[in-house]
């Protein structure tokens, strides 16, 4: 299979750019399995590759390409009471079968250059909160990788601060959201820092809490 077969896919071209920027050389890549969305876009793919590092040594031959994602850490304040909570979501995950406590998040897909816009869209879709992309602040200077030994997914972490009237604040707890056509069944919940850390089993969520706390301390 020619290396350029999937170059029209932003996920593939972004991965290739990162690998070559690191000084590695991609000599070939061959799809082993690909899964596409209903609109034809690549959802993810497993590829057999022939890549050498800057010193001529081969890299492991299998890569799972998913593309980048974004995670949003929203901290809201009740305008009437001053109470503060993190806006989180509950949804069942196929990897464990468990109900997972997470922050709003989503894949960038074709919008690889607009992580803030995707973050704003995902926050709205998963919680109903409308926040301008310009009101998000980055929690890390660059995307962070959790499993680079196999997959390419880099996660863009953002935070945002909102103050809501008491009725709107109260309506968030238990709100049902998500897109059933994409097997998304989500419930919104409000958590303190202590509750969130204690109740989640996600390394991604715990890292998000640490990044948010560090960023807030720098802003004070």
Image (cartoon, rainbow, N blue to C red):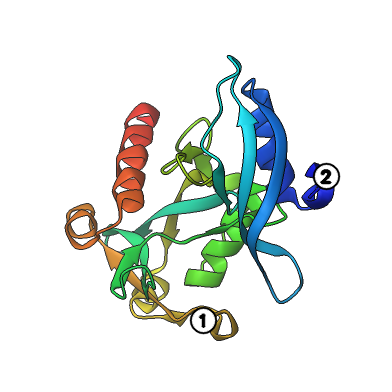
Using a 10 Å C-alpha cutoff, classify the residue at mark 1 as few (fewer than 14 neighbours), some (14 to 19) or many (20 or more). Answer: few
Residue 99 placed where, x, y %? 30, 74
Q: Nearer the viewer, residue 121 or 98?
A: 98
Find residue 190 and report its horizontal and vertical position in percent. Answer: 30, 67
Q: Residue at 51% across / 78% down in the picture?
A: 178
Instruction: Mark 2 and mark 1 in contact? Answer it, CB < 8 Å.
Output: no
Compare residues 215 and 179 and report the one nearer the observer: 179
Q: Residue at x 31, y 70 (%)?
A: 96
Q: Is residue 167 above or below residue 3?
A: below
Residue mark closest to the camera, 2 vs 1? 2
Residue drawn where x is 59% and y is 22% of the image: 53
The one of 110 and 216 positioned closer to us in this rendering: 110
Q: Please identify the residue farthest to the top as the structure is shown.
A: 55
Tell me if residue 107 comes above or below residue 157 in the rendering: below
Residue 100 rendering spot, x and y as whole percentages = 31, 68
Quadrant where the C terminus is found in the figure: top left
Q: Mark 2 vs mark 1: which is more N-terminal?
A: 2
The answer to whether residue 186 is left or right of residue 101 is right
Q: How many marks?
A: 2
Badge 1 element? loop
Q: Which residue is pictured at 56% across the width and 41% down the height?
A: 61
* Foreground of the two, 68 or 35: 35
Q: Is residue 27 visible?
A: yes
Q: Position of residue 14 (x, y in %)?
A: 69, 41
Residue that numbered label 2 is attached to? 4
Mark 2: secondary structure: helix
Residue 183: mark: 1
Q: What whole-number distance in Å separates the C-alpha atoms at marks 2 and 1?
A: 32 Å
Quadrant of the rendered image containing residue 130: bottom right
**Looking at the image, residue 48 lies above or below residue 36:** above
Taking the image as shown, residue 14 lies to the left or right of residue 152, namely right
Dot 2, how many residues are within 10 Å of its Cα: few (below 14), some (14-19), or many (20+)? Answer: few
């Amino acid at each position: 299979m020619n290396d350029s077969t999937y170059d029209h896919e932003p996920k593939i071209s972004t991965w290739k750019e990162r690998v070559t920027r690191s000084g590695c050389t991609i000599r070939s890549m061959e799809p082993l399995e690909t899964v596409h969305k209903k609109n034809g876009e690549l959802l993810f793919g497993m590829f057999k590759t022939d890549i050498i590092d800057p010193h001529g040594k081969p890299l492991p031959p299998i890569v799972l390409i998913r593309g980048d994602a974004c995670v949003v850490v929203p901290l809201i304040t009740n305008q009437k009471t001053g109470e503060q909570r993190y806006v989180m979501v509950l949804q069942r995950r196929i990897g464990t079968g468990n109900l997972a406590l997470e922050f709003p998040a989503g894949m960038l897909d074709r919008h690889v250059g607009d992580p803030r816009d995707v973050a704003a869209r995902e926050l709205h879709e998963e919680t109903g909160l409308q926040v301008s992309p310009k009101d998000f602040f980055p929690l890390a200077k660059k995307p962070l990788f959790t499993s680079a030994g196999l997959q390419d997914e880099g996660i863009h972490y953002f935070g945002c601060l909102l103050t809501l009237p008491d009725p709107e604040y109260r309506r968030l707890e238990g709100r049902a959201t998500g897109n059933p056509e994409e097997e998304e069944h989500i419930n919104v919940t409000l958590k303190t820092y202590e509750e969130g850390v204690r109740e989640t089993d996600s390394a991604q969520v715990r890292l998000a809490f640490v990044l948010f706390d560090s960023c807030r301390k720098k802003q004070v």
